[in-house]
Amino acid sequence: MKNIVVLVSGGGTNLQALIDAQESGAIKNGRITCVISSKPGVYALERAANHGIGTRVIARRDYADIISYSQAVLDAILEEKADLVVYAGFMTILDELVVKAMPNKMMNVHPALIPSFCGKGYYGLKVHEEALKKGVKLTGATVHFVTEVCDGGPIILQKGVEVLDDDTPETLQRRVMEQAEWKILPKAVSLFCEDRLEVRGSRVYIK
């Protein structure tokens, strides 16, 4: 049984999708053992507590720079004996010392079809605002391994979502979450825990 540590910064909707998948048996051979938040008092911590999952708060504001903050997060991850670390709305870009310690053991969900609308500055509603501004007919979500390049790691799963003529950034964000993020993130986590993901170069193969 693999230990999953989830990193959060806010409400925790993707965390809830993982918890629901775990409780329904959709995540095989893995369990969420700890949720780490970059901010105190966020609803994601309550979601975890409601399901008996341990939590930690490592507040970004308590650290002078990103290096010291990243080291504190890494120390916690190692203390929790994490086999997999999942970014679920975690709003801090950690120093590469973390991914170097956990190669191909950290994954993130991004609310677009990478390589579109990704990289530094593309997060939250900003992604959907840019998709609508560009006039794309199809958007979606991507689960990828985390590397030192923001949103640049090997892609694990993607799912497309149609863009409607009357969409606002808010309606599009909600539909991408419901139709894509909440489906492919738990699936990718389960594939990892079942040892069914193989990374060769920049590509991920599902065994």
Image (spheres, rainbow, N blue to C red):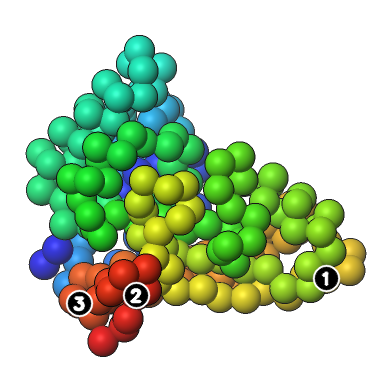
Question: Pointer 1: what residue?
Answer: 164
The residue under the point 76% across, 50% down is 129
Residue 204, which numbered label? 2
Q: Is residue 132 visible?
A: yes
Badge 1, how many Cα within 10 Å: few under 14, some, many 20+?
few
**Residue 161 location (% of width, % of height):** 67, 74
Q: Is residue 29 above or below residue 170?
A: below
**From the viewer's perspective, is residue 192 above or below residue 17?**
below
Image quarter where the N terminus lies is: bottom left
Q: Do callouts 1 and 3 mark residues in contact (Cβ within 8 Å)?
A: no
Q: As shown in the figure, which amino acid type bears the numbered disc 1?
A: Leu
The answer to whether residue 37 shows anywhere in this view is no
Residue 183's spot in the image, x, y percent? 48, 72
Front position in the image: 6 or 198? 198
Report the residue marked by disc 3.
194
Amino acid type of disc 2?
Val
Q: Residue furthest front?
A: 201
Q: Earlier in the sequence, mark 1 or mark 2?
A: 1
